[in-house]
Image (tube, helix red, strand yellow):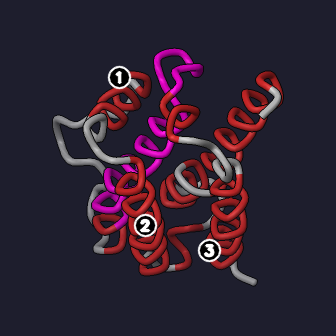
Amino acid sequence: MSEKADLLSGADAEFVEFKEAFKGLSEAQMSEVWCGTWSARDIAAHISGWHREMIPVLERITRGEKPIPDGVSYENVDAWNDKLAAAKKSWATADIFREMDASHADFKRAAAAVPDDRVARGKTAHRIVDLNGRHHYQVHRDDIAAWRKSRGI
């Protein structure tokens, strides 16, 4: 299996596990702030936000262009996280989850289009796909699981 195929299949598997972490939560539980200033629904919103933010980056890599346009910086990850979560504050929870599913699929399509040699370990595309895919899902799945355990949910 190619490195890219491994990343994409790993992202799919972790995405399923990530979504399982939300199962059975009520609307009140989904909206309860427990992760700094975030709720479970905010975590889902920021995941889809990162998908949408990284799709054009992957498309630029696919075309052989510089991944990040001049004047854009992702160095302040916390500010981006807050911005991406805040963008969906007024959304219904069901809409956030529909968008998260759609953005995951679109992110995977963009990643699949990147030439295999650009997705080798150590390459920018590899980091983008891994950090915004399976790794991101694992981190937040674990966060939600720990919160659920602490609350007996």
Question: Residue at 55% across / 75% down in the picture?
Answer: 117
Could you tell me if the residues under marks 2 and 1 are in contact, i.e. CB atoms within 8 Å?
Answer: no
x and y, in percent, of residue 17 in the image: 72, 58
Q: Hey, what amino acid is under mark 3?
A: Lys
Q: Main secondary structure of the magenta part?
A: helix
Q: CA distance from mark 2 to mark 1?
A: 21 Å
In the rendered structure, find residue 107 and report the number of the disc placed on it: 2
Pointer 2 local density, CA inside 10 Å: few below 14, some 14–19, many at least 20: many
Q: Quadrant of the N terminus?
A: bottom right
Is 62 located above or below residue 30 in the figure?
Answer: below
Q: Hey, what amino acid is under mark 2?
A: Phe
Quadrant of the rendered image containing residue 65: bottom left
In the rendered structure, find residue 4 and report the number of the disc placed on it: 3
Q: Is residue 141 magenta?
A: no
Mark 2 vs mark 1: which is more N-terminal? Answer: 1
Q: Hey, what amino acid is under mark 1?
A: Ala
The residue range painted magenta reads: 32-58
Under tag 2, what secondary structure?
Answer: helix
In the displayed image of the protein, which residue is found farthest to the top?
A: 36
Question: Residue at 40% across / 69% down in the picture?
Answer: 102
Mark 3 vs mark 2: which is more N-terminal? Answer: 3
Under tag 3, what secondary structure?
Answer: helix
Q: Which residue is mark 1?
A: 79
Apparent side of residue 32 relative to residue 11 in the rendered image (left or right):
left
x and y, in percent, of residue 138 in the image: 71, 47
